[in-house]
Every structure is written in structure tokens, then in C-alpha cells.
Image (cartoon, grey):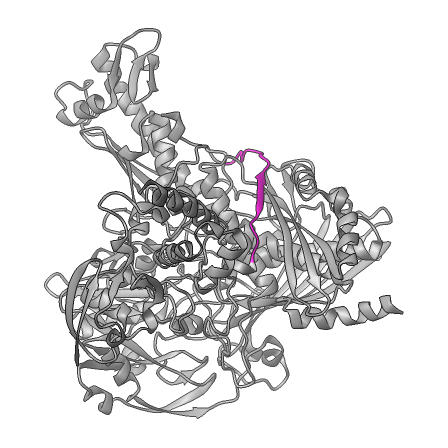
Amino acid sequence: MANVQLTVNGKAVSADVEDRTLLVQLLRDHLGLTGTHVGCDTSQCGACIVHIDGRAVKSCTTLVGQVDGANITTIEGISKGDELHPMQAAFRDNHGLQCGYCTPGMIMSAIDIVNRYGADLDEDTVRHELEGNICRCTGYHNIVKSVLDAASRMKLSIAAE
Amino acid sequence: MGVEGIGASVVRKEDRRFITGRGRYVDDIKVMGMTHAYFVRSPHAHAKITSIDVEAAKAMPGVVDVLTGQQIVDDKVGNLICGWAVHSKDGSAMKMGAWPAMAPETVRFVGQAVAVVIAETRNLARDAAEAVEVHYEELPSAHHIAMAIAPGAPQLHPEAPGNIVYDWSIGEEKAVDEAFAKAANVVTFELVNNRLVPNAMEPRAALAEYNEAEEHFTLHTTSQNPHVARLVLSAFYNIAPEHKLRVVAPDVGGGFGSKIFIYPEEMVALWASKKVRRPVKWTGDRNEAFLTDAHGRDHISKAEMAFDADNKILGLRVKTHANFGAYMSLFSSSVPTYLYATLLSGQYNIPAIYAEVIGVYTNTTPVDAYRGAGRPEACYLLERLMETAARQLKVDPAELRRKNFITSFPHQTPVIMAYDIGDFGASLDAALKAIDYAGFPARREKAKSEGKLRGLGFSCYIEACGIAPSKAVGSLGAGVGLWESAEVRVNPVGTIEVLTGSHSHGQGHETTFAQLVAGRLGIPISQVSIVHGDTDKVQFGMGTYGSRSAAVGMSAIFKAMEKVEKKAKKIAAHQLEASEDDIVIENGEFKVTGTDKSIALPMVALAAYTAHNLPDGMEPGLKEGAFYDPTNFTFPAGSYICEIEVDKGTGKSTIIKFVAVDDFGRLINPMIVDGQVHGGLAQGIGQAILEQAIYDDTGQLVTASFMDYAMPRADDVPSFEISHTTTLCPGNPLGVKGCGEAGAIGASAAVINAITDAIGNNKLDMPATPDRVWHAMQAPLQQAAE
């Protein structure tokens, strides 16, 4: 057993967990944050992506012990109250989701992509960057559209601040 | 309010919970005292179980119990069933091998469950599963069709000599023989339809609870059809009678057919919850999904088409072997027969068709319906045959198709289906325009000058959806009727709940179904809630598959709405002292036509429930139900054209442009319809160039993870160019045909036809991996060089 202390969606968390506990298990089973999903067991599908200190990481292959002291953001932590994150709004407005299972991971991954590329984002880059996120419903068409739309919204909201 | 009615691309009501991480899938649910199940599975493709020792596992920390297949048999839990009786040519019934939920004696595919560990946590259950000691005596196995039908092949089931499930046929053999006898040209083609794994992103899961005091079970499960699940669990598996079993399918993360069926794991979870007297949760991992979710396709076919001197089709002869895996899954028998061979006429006027289908057992995961279910196999065969014919007859592939299109409706094909309506030429014209067909030769030349091979491929598909008229499918062997039910409840404050037997697992019913109701009454969709997926709430329903929810499910809602409106108009007329016939519904108000008198929906609803002033003899309340049984299948159809570029050095294919023109009849929400097409296309393209379930020589599924099975990723597919032509379906009140499967049905043939066009070699099977394409292009390249 190990004790870990970390911040999840702005709240301090202290947990005693088995050494083998994965971050996704901590989030889902201990903290009840079930928006982060598990879609595979080989770190391929990206349904489990969260932000660790601002970077998109697959929480299914991260041991809780590795993130002691880290700042974790999950899909539940990106909107401001009722106000959706621009990426969430873009997915809704562009029909970037169907069954919704891959969506949290897609959104968390996409925010990181936009953060890294900013205005330089184009369709090919988005498609290449989403290599680690699998969706079986949308054929990616509207996901790509959503990410590009959000990129311009996020740029605007940064400009407004 | 018309902006939210039928035809409006309103954003989805359900999205907010999904994009904020508040969806509620089965594995998200926790209950007090919950235990976790983990299955012990066969590592062998075919073996006798000689012993199972569970004692060491039982002694492991946190283990509640370990249960085996023999206990399932001892408890008289029923074997898994196949719900569609298909008969062989000679009239004999299909040969069913017994399929217990956990194998007591013999395992017949890698991954088949033999025991289950119930423990306090999933990790502890998994640890203990490793300590269950199972001894096997390996048996010879057959994992491919050819192996299973070879003389002296290992036999899977004593009930099925030669591993043959059935030897079925459709159409007139004699008429086809006559057609071929007078043919000017005959085109022959052999093909493989590759085996696929559905891979909905949410793995299957079950949470079973047993309430001892009430002798009542509750099962939360990843199902496309919870009522059918309850029916089968009750009537055939003896788990509990229907009134003592509630099945809930909450948010479900994709299905594509694979979540229609009742699987061993869900059954075992229910049974185990009573055994251990505690709730049992099972959540499959991806490896288990690969090994146990019903696979799709897996055909080997030979097809011949006869043409007259004017290139008109005279006849079609098809012989298909279909791999069913080790056991007959719930609807498997119908897939390569009534959902496949009945579509072999495609969009074409074919006077005579004869098809034989031989169903085969192999030591592999069971095979059943996967997006399109039989219809993609029919389309792929026919459209490759048409393209082959065009090349052999040296005619334009578009014109050969057009020459043979069915142009008058209704049209009775020689293989059961009666097409009600369509305009195949219109879709083809629109697709040719969208791809700029006239400009293709120039684009091909330009690509050539850049060292690339460019090709164009067509696929003109038709499918039978809106599944299905109950009487018709009953006569073909279906064990159930395929109608749908709906109930419309107007609350006393005027908000509305619609209860439907359809189930949404990505299709957006909470929005589209609300659009129908809101549009009719002229109220915002926010005032309409759709309730589905719970046998305690919705009386009965047949669920969602076969692109049936708009054509059948919404038609049931339409019927219920008519009844609600009729009663509401009576109440309004009474309140307004007007004639019922003069009442019209506009913008949420009941108006007396030609006057300024009106009463708002909430007031009508309130009047219905206060019942202080209703017409004499009228019952209080405003709630109506309806069952809708379609009169025919619906027939979505369209033309797909794929333009592809192949790299000469690597054999890698890149889709330059993919054009899809579909005729789905009336569109409820065009945004959602397009989304359905996108997803279907990606699955069809995935089948064409990426995906294949591969068994090695020992029957191991070597593509059992996302590292080994090539799922389409974002950079494998292009953005799509989609448009529509419209002929309204005359068979249902909404004029809708269904859009869920089209992309997966039509896309593969277009892609392969494009690649073979590019490389100049027609001998190519799916998936057209760079390796396969590179090898296929060598001979033509050499010829060209010479």
C-alpha cells in the first residue's frame, strides 16, 4: 500500500492505494470520476486520457505512484460551472460524438493538441495527432471538424483574456 | 418551433452529459456489497476439460466463490439459443450444437469461459483466476472454412456431421441454368469477405443484483435490446420469469450489432448473483471483447453472372460458405441467408438468381450480425462482380450499372425482396458529378506523371432496413416479431415523455425522437424527454439494429402521437366550445380554425388530469400507446465512388476522395444522418484496407488487441463528401428508410474497385494491405514495362 497526495480538478486528494493501482482506477473507483473511460488494455484507444500537469496522458498506463504530487485534470474538471470548455462546445456543435464513450479522451487529447499547436493546426495535423485516440462511431470526420473549430474558438478566448 | 422539428439539424440533447463526463455506462455504476467477476477462459481452440481445481483460487484473498460450467449444468440453466430457424434445401432443420454459458466438458474456441471467480475487487478476481487449475486434453481443431469442410476434419459437434450447420438455397436453379445457357458472356469471380471484430469502444459489461426478499433480479447490461435480453434470459435460460427480472441498458458505448446478442458472461453474472447472494459486476477487457464479442462477415464465395450481347444481366449464380464459429449465436443463422442472399439482386434487374449458402462450424469465436449484417457481404460480392464485368466486357462501369438499373417500382426480385421505391440513376448521376468523373482521366495522367497509380471505384448498394414485417420474418423462421412499441405520456403541466422500445447507443434518439413529437405539437424539444432502455419503464420493445429505429420505432411514436392528438383535440374542442374537426395544433396551442380562440397544450393537459370538465364519458389522463408493425422492409440505396492513389514503391493506398450519395427517404436530422454515414464509411473502409481477424495454425486469434488488429484511426480515413437524393418511403408514415448501416455496406466495394482499377489487377482480397497491394501490382507493372 502506498499513500499518494495529488490534486484532482483543483481539489487536494489523499489516497491509500495498492501499489499496482492505476491512475484510471483511482479516478473511477476511488474518486467516482467515471467520465474517464477504459476502452482497451494496451494503451491504444485513448478513452482514458487525462491531463497530468497540463499534458495529455493515458491514465490506464500510469501508476498512481508515478503521479504523487501532480496536478490532474479530468473531463469533469474542464468546464467552468455551466459554461462549457470551448472544446466541449465544439464537439457538441459539430456532432463530434455519437455513443460518447471515446469522447472524454478525445476532448482531453484535443485540448492538448490545440495548446501545443495553437494557430498552426490544420486537418492533417489533427488527424496525425489523434492517432492515439480510437473512435468507432464517427469516422473521425466530425471530430476533426470539432477540433479545428475549437482551435479557433480557443484562440479567440485567449485573445479575449 | 418548426426549427426543431423533422428536417432540422438540431444539436443533440444527450451530448451535454457525454462531453462533461457525466454519461452513465454500466461500468460506471456501483452498488452496495458489489463483487467482481473474472472469467477463466480456454487457451485452446478445441479441447476436453479433464479436470478443474478451484480450491487454491477459493483460498486466495478476497475471493467470494469460484463457479464452474458443471454448476451451470447442475442448476439447469439453459443453453444459449439461436433465435432464427433456417432449414436446409432438403427441409431439415439447422444443426445446433449445445452451447452452455460455461463449458462443462469441451471447449471449442480460444476464450470460451470455463469458470468464473467472484471476488471483492476486479484485481483480486483476476489474481485468483490465474490460480484456477484447468487440465485439458487437446483435440485437433479447424479454424477456417476450408479446414472444417475438408474430409476427415475434426468434428465440433456430434449434432452437426461434417461441421455443416445447414446447406440452404434461395431462387430458381433451373431458371438460372437456362439464363447461363443463352448467355453471350459469363463473368466469374471468387472472393473472400474478411472476418471482422465489431469493437464498440465500450467493452461489454453486466451488473447483476439479486433481491432475495422479492426473488427479483436486476441486470444492468450493455445491450441494444434490453427487452429481448429479458425475454431470452427468462424464456430460455430459466434465470427468472420476466416479471422478476428487470433489464436496464443505460448509456451504451456503441453496438454495431455486437450488443444485440445475449452472451454467456451476462447470463453467468445473473446466475452468480443469486449463488453468492451479492451483486456481481463483470466488465470485459478489450482482449475479452476480441475473443468473445460475436465477430462479423467471414465468407468465401464464388459468383457467376450471365450477360446477353447487349450487356444486360440474364442471371446470377452464387455459392457461399459462411463461417459461424464454434456455436450458433442469437441471430447468426439469418445473417448469411435472409439478410444476405435476399439482397443479391442489388440495384439491378436480374431475371434469375440462385444462391446456395453453406453454414460451417469452426473452432473460432461465434459469428453474428455486425453493422450491415449480410448486406455488406451481398453488396461487396455484387459490386466487385459488376466492376469485373465492366472490365471484362470493356464497358464503362457506370454505364454498365445504369443499363441494368431497376427503374420501375415496385419491383419484385427473384430473391424475396419487393423494392418499394428508389431512383438509382439519380444517385449515380449525383455521385459522378461530385467526383468529377469527366475529369478523372486527366487526374489519372497527372498522378502517373508523379509516379502514382490512381484508380476509381464504384459501389451502388441497396439494403433492406426497417427490420421488419413480423409476419414475413416469421414465415422465414424468425423466433420473434420485429415491430416496435411506443407510449406518449403528456404530463399535467404539458411536458412530454416518450417511452420507446428502441435503444440509443450513439444514434441520438433522445434528439431525433423528440424532434418528431416537438414538431407535431409546435413545442421546443426541451419539453420532450425520451425514455428507453429499461424494462421497468418501457413495456416491451425489440431494440435497435438493422437501421430500424426511425422507420419502425419512430413510426410507433407517430401512431401514438396521432391518438394523443385526437384525444387532446376533443378536450380542446370541449373547453373552447367548438367542433373537434375545427381544432388545429400550432405552436403548442390548440386553435379553432378561422377564429382567435385557442387553448395552450399545458391547459389541455391539465384539463385531462383534473378531469373537472371533460367531454361526457371521456377517461381522464392524456397517455397513449401504439405498436407499429411495418408492412415491408425499407430500401435505402445509393452510389459511392472512391478515388484512390497507390504508391508504387510501398503499395500503400491513400483515399483522395470519397463521395457518398444516399437515398434515405426523409431525413429527420441531417446532421445526425451524416454522422451515421461517416461512421459507416470508416467501418467499410476499415474492412477494405485495414481490418482482419486472423487465426493462426493452432486456432489462436493473433489479432486480439488494438496493437494487432488495425482499427481505422483518424489518419487512415479522409473527410467525406456526402449528399442525398430523395424518394420518400411509401411504407411508413414518416417516409424514412434508415441510415445506420449504409456506409458500412457500400464502402468496401468502392475502395477495392478503386485499388484494383489503379493497379490493373483484379485479384485482390480485403484487407488490401500495402503488402497485398504491392504483390498484386507487380505483374501488371512488369507487363507495362515490357
Q: Nearer the viewer, residue B228 or B59?
A: B59
Q: Residue furthest right?
A: B786
The one nearer the camera, B533 or B124, is B124
Give the tally of numbered discs: 0
- For the residue pair A64 and B346, the one nearer the viewer reads as A64
**Per the image, is B719 magenta?**
yes
The answer to whether residue B657 is left or right of residue B165 is right
Where residue B397 appears, as percent x and y from the top left, is: 76, 49
- Residue B591 placed where, x, y %? 30, 14
- Residue B13, visible in the rendered structure: yes
Q: x and y percent of residue B303 in the render?
A: 71, 62
- Give the prevailing secondary structure in the magenta stretch: loop
Q: Residue furthest top?
A: B595
- Give the magenta range: B717-731
> Is the C terminus of chain B in the top left, top right, bottom left or bottom right quadrant?
bottom right
- In which image quadrant can residue B531 be found? top left
* Residue sitting at x 26%, y 66%: B239
Q: Position of residue B322 (x, y in %)?
A: 58, 68
